[in-house]
Image (spheres, grey):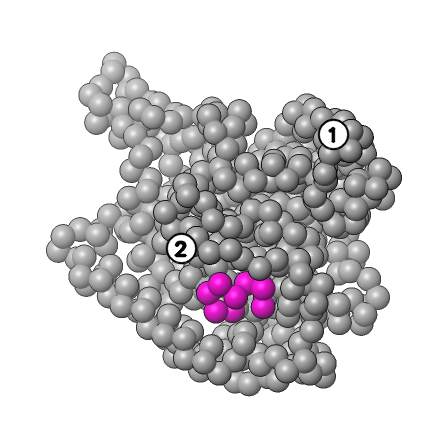
Amino acid sequence: MSEIIRLSASELGERIAAGDISSVEATRAHLDRIAAVDGAVHAFLHVDGERALATASELDRRRAAGEPFGPLAGVPIAIKDVLVTEGMPSTAGSRILEGWIPPYDATPVRRVREAGLVPLGKTNMDEFAMGSSTEHSAYGPTHNPWDLDRIPGGSGGGSAASVAAFEAPLALGSDTGGSIRQPAHVTGTVGVKPTYGGVSRYGSIALASSLDQIGPVTRTVLDAALLHDVIGGHDPLDSTSIPEAWPSMAEAVRRADVAGLRIGVVKQLDAEGFQRGVRTRFHEALELLERNGAEIVEVDAPHFEYAIAAYYLILPAEASSNLAKFDSVRFGLRVTPDGGGTVEQVMAATREAGFGPEVKRRIILGTYALSAGYYDAYYGSAQKVRTLVQRDFDAAFANVDVLATPTAPTTAFKLGEKLDDPMSMYLNDVATIPANLAGVPGISVPAGLAPEDGLPVGIQFLAPARQDARLYNVGAALEQLLLAEWGRPLLDLAPDLSRHELTATEEGAL
Ligand code: GLN
């Protein structure tokens, strides 16, 4: 494996800025890696090597001409297919958008381009970001680089797997109920859901507009912070974008220190139903932080247990409305019934063929929850629960600086295990959903491997809205302490995927 792809994004950026490695070399190394392992991992739906190399060579020319170079300039990046990209397919994992080429870039994509990053392609995801395993992608699942028979998390399994498999040093994801943090947890990577309004949603194919946030997926906390600094900040094109200036997240990483930090452990999310090894690593991480000056206190969040129920009404309600725009006229697929049909018949045939079962399930649920007779009973009640969850956070943050939970209840489960059981799939989000309901930021940082199955476990930290820097502080501090203990990054322990470099026949069998 080329040494270049093992570098963190910040190291790679430094070497590129110093003229040690060219952006073309860095881009080619990652494209080679994709060619070698993505047949087995299937993190990408679309790779545009030619355009990536052209961008990289232009950047090399600009660097040689002495133009100012940011910390991530020249570094390749993978982009979740939920973000629209000018001239590059953007399907959100759905057949209904197959063949659609957007005429513009989403704001986070535009910002990464302006910062000199090099988009490699688009990553796989559950259709319209609905799911926790990437198995709801219309284009087949992504495989977890730690064990190819297991899920890489979802909905952003492609982004997390691409980073864990060293196909890209950085990726962008979207998190509506955990789709950045849960994939990070099961792949041994770092994932951040920023404060609602902290990163523009302009050009993100909306799932649930009051919950969606775009954020970084990386191998180190510093890399996440550097990427957050690139994509974050006010955007007049998103009416929910927070207008104030933000502190530098990378600065928070550089000054990381947990002395005196009060960390609240949410009682309801440190419970029996969680896998034993997940809790073991969680408690070890907390003890490590405590030994280094943090204060650990128990926190009660009584309404968190209703968060999933509220979320699975609010999300389908918003999704059913957002997905109404896929009407066979404006984007992608159009299916005309045999012998023709009315506009309504074409629309119905297109939606029937273009949406997968999970999307249909949620559209039906959401339409029902919003119907006149049931609106108050379902949507109205869910919104009240949402307020109660927000108040739990307010009460907790009156006493502590950050909250800590395991990121998800179990390590990566087997592909297929939960596919026919939507309820058990939904339960995966128990620890991540409260943050989306309240709009607060969260980070998942690798905490080690579960002793019983040797698979990655993440610890989640949550902070008050707009205090994203606190997450980078505690996340970086823990990362440093664990690195000192382990002697090497967790991902060094992941299997060497080069043995999976596939022959054409094997690839056909996947
Ligand atoms: N797993 C959650 C869901 O299915 C989260 C999705 C997301 O964050 N996009 O809705």
Q: Closest to the observer: 390 or 134?
A: 390
- Residue drawn at 64 percent across, 68 percent down: 473
Query: Mark 2 and mark 1: span between their CA atoms?
Result: 39 Å
Whether the magenta-drawn stretch holds residue 464 is answered as yes
How far across and down, in percent of the image, does residue 403 sit? 53, 74
Of marks 2 and 1, which one's residue comes earlier in the chain?
1
Q: Is mark 2 on a helix, strand or loop?
A: loop
Q: What stretch is highlighted in magenta?
A: 463-470
Q: Is residue 408 visible?
A: no
| Position of residue 446 in the picture relative to residue 406 (left or right) | right
Amino acid tagged 1: Arg
Whether residue 417 appears in magenta in the rendering, the answer is no
Disc 2 marks which residue? 211
| Residue 62 tag number | 1
Disc 2 residue lies near ligand 1 with CB under 8 A: yes
Residue at the spot 30% in from the left edge and 20% down from the top edge: 336
Mark 1 residue CB less than 8 A from any atom of ligand 1: no
Residue 109 visible in the snapshot:
yes
